[in-house]
Image (tube, rainbow, N blue to C red):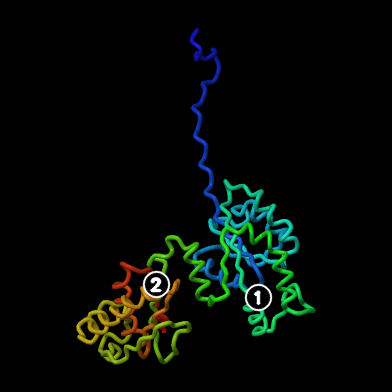
Amino acid sequence: MASDRRLEGSAPSLPSLPSPPSAARVQLVLITGVSGAGKSSAMKALEDLGFYCIDNLPLSLLRPLLTAPADHVPGADRVAVVTDVRAPGLVVDLPDLLESLDRTKVDPFLLFLDTSDEVLLRRYTETRRKHPLASDGPVIDGIAAERELLTELRGQADRIMVTSDWTVHEIRAEVINEFGGEALDRDGVVVSLVSFGFKRGIPYGSDLLFDVRYLPNPHFVEGLREQTGLDGPVREFLDNQPEFGELEARLGELLEFLLPKFQEENRSYLTVSVGCTGGRHRSVAMVEALATRLQGDWRVRASHRDTHL
C-alpha cells in the first residue's frame, strides 16, 4: 500500500496555507539626555517627519509602549518618545528594558542629547527655570547630579548629539539628516498656495506674500462679477491680459528659485499667499496657475479663502 494512500472514509487533507506575513517593525526613536540640551526641538523635527511623538511618558506607561508600540499606537509605523530624569525609575530600569525588547517588532534607536555645563547654565539663567534635580539649590548641582545619573544611558546611545554650539535650527537639521531618509528630497516640502482678499486681511502664517491688485479686474467686466477665478470665462479673460501671463511667469521663476533654498533649510512646509482686492478673481486665478506650474516638482496645495464670500 502506498504510503500516501488515505484511509477509506477519512476526510481529504487540505493543502497547508502560507503563514501570514509578519507585521513590519515599528521604528522607535527614544530621545533622552540632559535637561536643556534640545530634546523638545528634536521631537518637533521628528514630528514634522511624520513620527507619532509622545513627550515625557512615565516609565510605567513607557514599558508597554516599547514592548509593543503597534498595539498602543495603531497605524503608526514611526514613533518617537521623549523621556528624561523626571520619569521615575528611568535611569534604573530603561537600560534593561531596551535590552529586553523584541527586535522583530521594534526597531529602537536611542538618541542622547548633551551640551556643556556653561551652555546649560546660560540657558537656565536666561529662562529663569529651575533644574529638575535642583529645585532648592544651585543649578550647577542639578546639572552634575543629572550627568551622573545618565552616564549609563549615554553609553548605550546609538547617537549622541552635542548641541553646545547649535541653534534650534541646527538641531532640527541634524535630526532630519539622521532620520529623514526619503523625506529629504523635494517631495517632502508642502507648498501651500493661498488666495485672499486684502479687504479681509492677510492670511495668518504667510511666508511669502504677493499683491496682484494691479492686474485688470474681472469684477468690473459684465458677466464676470459673480464668477470666480475658478471659472472658465474669468480665466479666459485674465489669460488674454499680457500682464497676467508675465506676472505668472516671473512669480513662477521666483518660486522655482526659492523653494530649493527653503528645502536646504529643512523647511517642511511653505505658505505662499496671493492677494487681490476681494480674493475672488485675480488672486484665485494666479494661485491656480502657479499650482499647475509647480505640481510636477513639489507637493502643492491650493486653497481659496474668500471665494465663498
Q: Within 10 Å of the Cα at label 2, are there few (<14), some (14-19), or many (20+) other Cα atoms? A: some
The one nearer the camera, 124 or 60, is: 124
- Picture coordinates of residue 162, whole percent (x, y): 57, 69
Whether 179 is drawn above or below 282: the answer is above
Whether 261 is drawn above or below 66: the answer is below
In the image as oriented, which residue stretches furthest toward the right? 136
Badges 1 and 2: C-beta atoms under 8 Å apart?
no
Q: Within 10 Å of the Cα at label 1, are there few (<14), some (14-19), or many (20+) other Cα atoms? A: some
**Element type at mark 2:** strand
Q: Which quadrant, please, contains the C terminus? A: bottom left
- Picture coordinates of residue 289, whole percent (x, y): 29, 76
Residue 117 bears which disc, if any? 1
For this view, does 256 lie left or right of residue 1? left
Residue at 51% x, 67% y is: 175
Based on the displayed image, in which of its 4 quarters is residue 36 positioned? bottom right
Q: Earlier in the sequence, mark 1 or mark 2?
A: 1
- Picture coordinates of residue 166, whole percent (x, y): 53, 75
Q: Which residue is mark 2?
A: 301
